[in-house]
Image (cartoon, helix red, strand yellow):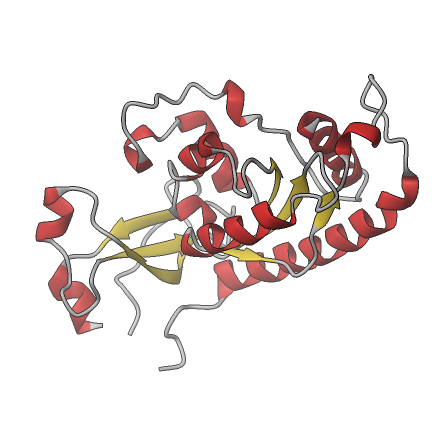
Amino acid sequence: MSEHAAKLMVARIAGRPGVETELIDVATLPIPVDDAGEALKDAELSEKLNHADALVIVSPEYNHGYPGLLKHVLDTNLKEYIHKAAGVVGVSAGVFGGARVIQNLIPVLRELGLVTIFWDVNFTTVGSRFDEDGNLLDESFLPRIDKFLDELLWMAETLRYGREHVTIGGSG
Amino acid sequence: MSAPSMTCPKCDTEMNHQADKLVHPTTAEEAARMTPALDGVIESVFACPGCGWIDSRRESGAQAQSR
């Protein structure tokens, strides 16, 4: 069901003027599991991350945490994330809507150099939120998604200016 | 004081030194280059004002400490 949530987010982002977006499914990436970290960097993924100004991470919650595969893939890059905006969409079968996966993921994103926004999206009881074709059944989620994207795009634009024009230690 | 400059490999524009990220060693080679006072290796990250490309380089312990 996370896939339905991810596709909805992609559609909402793509509807914003001047914004390009792409869905990256970590389950389809050709990244081995016999090592970890930047040694496993996938050139195509890194190119996409380098080009991106922001990431929206849509994650299911398993045992209060994030999927190991998501962490494994995130760990394959570093410079591509620095001073870029990130927002997290939690997905769960229960009523907490991935609140615990978001809490556990944010310290990881911070260490990777991403700047997390203060809006989240929580898909509670996700099994009842989409039909079989992935259509959203409950439009009450849309205003929160729009607020999430407003903040994400502001942060993305501001951080892009900072990355390109504000030098670290420049005032010292 | 900023790290030595970097030129964008995509469009030849001078890049902006936007971050010094502390990276914890994962290999013996990196551990040997570690800056003890920082407990890691500094990765200097640059962004291109021309095309937005990001690049980086890891500084040696001496370079990281002198900045």
Which corner quadrant of the image does residue B2 belong to? bottom left
In this rendering, position of residue B37 left or right of residue A78: left
Nearer-the-camera pick, B61 or B39: B39
Q: Image height check: is B23 above or below B53?
A: below
Nearer-the-camera pick, A102 or A19: A102
Residue B14 in view (yes/no): no
Q: Position of residue A32 (x, y in %)?
A: 35, 21
The residue at the point 71 percent across, 58 percent down is A151
Q: Image height check: is B50 above or below A118?
A: above
Q: Image height check: is B62 above or below A35?
A: below
Which corner quadrant of the image does residue A135 belong to? top right
Q: Position of residue A41 (x, y in %)?
A: 35, 31
Q: Position of residue B34 (x, y in %)?
A: 14, 57
Residue A158 in view (yes/no): yes
In this rendering, position of residue A172 left or right of residue B51: left
- Residue at the outermost bottom position: A172
Nearer-the-camera pick, A86 or A34: A34
Nearer-the-camera pick, A168 or B9: A168
In this rendering, position of residue A140 left or right of residue B56: right
Count the marks: how many? 0
The residue at the point 91 percent across, 40 percent down is A139
- Residue at the outermost left position: B32
Q: Position of residue A1 (x, y in %)?
A: 71, 26
The residue at the point 36 percent across, 55 percent down is B45
- Image quarter where the C terminus of chain A lies is bottom left
